[in-house]
Image (cartoon, rainbow, N blue to C red):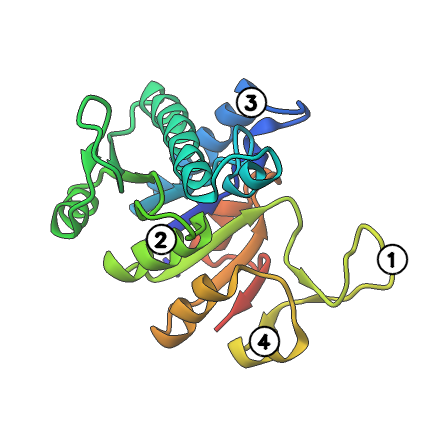
């Protein structure tokens, strides 16, 4: 196996599928099956998912809601998505634990680093909801921080594009996809991978990032087993 313990970062928008908002049951099922195949390989899996399909903190200011209040609303949206992912995984017989940056014991455990690591060691899939529990931090930052805390081998950022390109491939047909980049190259060229806080956390702690297309069947398994080059590796 290329990686023993991974942190999978999914965007909330990805759960919309072809809808304009909310959660697409077909997309949820697809992700659950992709994760199950990797789990069967013996990989320890942690997951962070965004909440953009339901609510974004940055939307709050435009609608007149206080930014901090809006960010907390966005954190609650990530918990809704995390619960949906948890349900889909458990339907297929996987054991999971949902841990939250905000205390809400009725639906999830509070995040405690040692407990999270122990869950992973016991073969449970750990889903981190509610960000880090503080406003002004994105779920990308949550993914980087939790990956460092649980000593994950890599952050896998599942998107709808198959890696990092020299330009937007949807707008520029001449855009070139990179197989590998250094952290410095990403910064120097201004490629948009994660927000700078999240990116710097990975850089300073030597946690590699792989940007890949999560929607292509089998991609996650191919990536984790190392049977072929998938996505773009930043290290």
Q: How far apart are labels 1 and 4 at the CA level?
A: 23 Å
> Which of the marked residues, 2 or 1, is nearer the chain's N terminus?
2
Query: How many callouts does the rendering have?
Result: 4
Quarter residue 205 falls in: bottom left
> Which of the marked residues, 2 or 3, is nearer the chain's N terminus?
2
Residue 208 relative to residue 18: left or right: left
Contact between labelled residues 1 and 2, with CB atoms less than 8 Å apart: no
In the image, residue 115 sits, relative to residue 194, either above or below, namely above
Q: Label 4 belongs to which residue? A: 187
> Which of the marked residues, 1 or 4, is nearer the chain's N terminus?
1
In the image, residue 22 sits, relative to residue 137, either above or below, namely above
In the image, residue 113 sits, relative to residue 20, either above or below, namely below
In this rendering, which labeled residue sits more in front, label 4 or label 2?
Answer: 4
In this rendering, which labeled residue sits more in front, label 1 or label 4?
Answer: 4
Q: Label 2 belongs to which residue? A: 6
Q: Label 3 belongs to which residue? A: 22
Q: How far apart are labels 3 and 1 at the CA level?
A: 31 Å
SS under mark 4: helix
How many neighbours does mark 1 have within 10 angstroms: few (below 14), some (14-19), or many (20 or more)? Answer: few
Q: How far apart are labels 4 and 2 at the CA level?
A: 24 Å
Contact between labelled residues 1 and 3, with CB atoms less than 8 Å apart: no
Q: Label 1 belongs to which residue? A: 173
Residue 63 or residue 54, whichever sits in front: 63
Contact between labelled residues 4 and 1, with CB atoms less than 8 Å apart: no
């Amino acid at each position: 196996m290329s990686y023993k313990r991974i942190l999978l970062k999914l965007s909330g928008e990805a759960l919309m599928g072809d809808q304009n908002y909310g959660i697409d049951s077909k997309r949820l099922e697809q992700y659950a099956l992709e994760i199950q195949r990797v789990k069967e390989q013996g990989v320890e899996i942690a997951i962070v998912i965004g909440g953009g399909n339901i609510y974004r903190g940055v939307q709050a200011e435009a609608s007149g809601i206080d930014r901090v209040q809006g960010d907390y609303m966005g954190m609650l949206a990530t918990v809704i998505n995390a619960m949906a992912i948890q349900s889909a995984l458990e339907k297929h017989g996987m054991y999971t634990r949902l841990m939250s940056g905000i205390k809400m014991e009725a639906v999830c455990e509070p995040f405690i680093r040692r407990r999270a690591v122990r869950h992973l060691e016991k073969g449970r899939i750990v889903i981190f909801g509610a960000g880090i529990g503080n406003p002004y931090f994105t779920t990308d930052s949550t993914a980087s921080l939790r990956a460092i805390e649980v000593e994950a081998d890599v952050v896998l950022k599942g998107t709808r594009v198959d890696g990092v390109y020299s330009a937007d491939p949807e707008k520029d047909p001449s855009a070139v996809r990179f197989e590998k980049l250094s952290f410095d190259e990403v910064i120097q060229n201004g490629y948009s991978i994660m927000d700078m806080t999240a990116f710097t956390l990975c850089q300073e702690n030597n946690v590699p990032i792989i940007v890949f297309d999560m929607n292509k069947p089998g991609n996650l398994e191919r990536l984790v087993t190392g049977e072929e080059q998938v996505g773009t590796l930043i290290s």
